[in-house]
Structures are given as C-alpha cells and as structure tokens.
Amino acid sequence: MRRRTTRANNSFLLGSLVMIVLVLVVVVLFLFLSFRIYDKKDHASYAERYEIVFDKSALDSPLTIYINDSLLFSGTPRPELTLSVGRFAKESSLLVVDDATKGVSTIALSDRSETVRIAKKENGGYKKLVE
C-alpha cells in the first residue's frame, strides 16, 4: 500500500514539473516574439529640418507654437526669433495658438526641409507666407 502511494505522489510531482516547464517555455517564447516584433517597428529618423520665422505682423501678441503635439515656443516672439526644428514624424503640421484670443491656426508642413514664414491674417489667424 505504501509503495502504491509513493508511486502516485511521484507521478503527480513529475506531471506538475512537466506542466511548470511547459508554462515557462510558453512565457519565454511569447516574450521573445513580442520584443522581436517591437524591434522591427519603424524607428525612422529624418534628416529634414524646418526653420520657422515670424513676420513682423506676428510679433505683437503672445503665441504658443506646436509641431504635432510637441511644444516649441510659448510667449511673445521677438524680432530675432527663429525656430529650427528637425522633422520627427512622417507627417507634420504646425499649430499656432494666439494666446490672447485662443484661436488656433493649422499649417501643413511638407516632407522636405523648408523655411516657414508666419504672418498674421486680417481676421486674427496666422498663415504661411509663400516665398
């Protein structure tokens, strides 16, 4: 009787050990594949740069400047203020927020390096000057 109980316990322990090893193998395999897929994602870096220059008409009121969701500038621009920003996304747009009126102007940026001149429109928004 005692020998039969010992054999049953050994079988149970061996089965548990096999189950634990299989679970660990599945977890390690899942983590390995997850990190491998993550490394294959596009981590693009771009050589293009945007240079943002303010026209004289845009220098009188406080502004907040964003590219996509990244804050570039907040305050009243001075005449010598020029922002130089590297391209960091496939598609980008420049958001100019007039802090006095809370009006938002959106300017699409090209996929090549460019100089963006910003001027104030008559209706209070901001526009990109074409050179």
Image (spheres, rainbow, N blue to C red):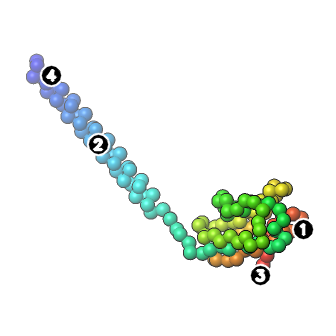
Residue 67, x across and y down, in percent: 67, 63
Other-residue count near label 2 (Cα within 10 Å), few / some / many at <14 / 14–19 / ≥20: few
- Considering only order in the chain, which callout, 3 or 4, is on the residue closer to the N terminus? 4
Which residue carries the number 4 mark?
5
Q: Earlier in the sequence, mark 3 or mark 2?
A: 2
Residue 65: image quadrant is bottom right
Identity, as a three-letter code, of the amino acid under mark 3:
Glu
Of marks 3 and 1, which one's residue comes earlier in the chain?
A: 1
Q: Which structural element holds mark 4?
A: helix
Please give the name of the residue rendered at 33% of the width and 46% of the height, measured from the top-left corner.
26
Compared to residue 16, the image places residue 57 above or below, namely below
- Using the numbered discs, state the Cα–Cα distance from disc 2 to disc 1 in whole angstroms: 71 Å
- Distance (Cα) linking label 2 and label 4: 26 Å
Q: Please report the residue visible at 78 percent of the width from the left and 78 percent of the height from the top.
A: 130
Identify which amino acid the numbered label 4 is placed on: Thr
Label disc, if present, on residue 122 of the rendered structure: 1
Q: Look at mark 2 in the image and give the residue it sits on.
A: 22
Left or right position of 72 against 13: right
Q: Which residue is mark 3?
A: 131
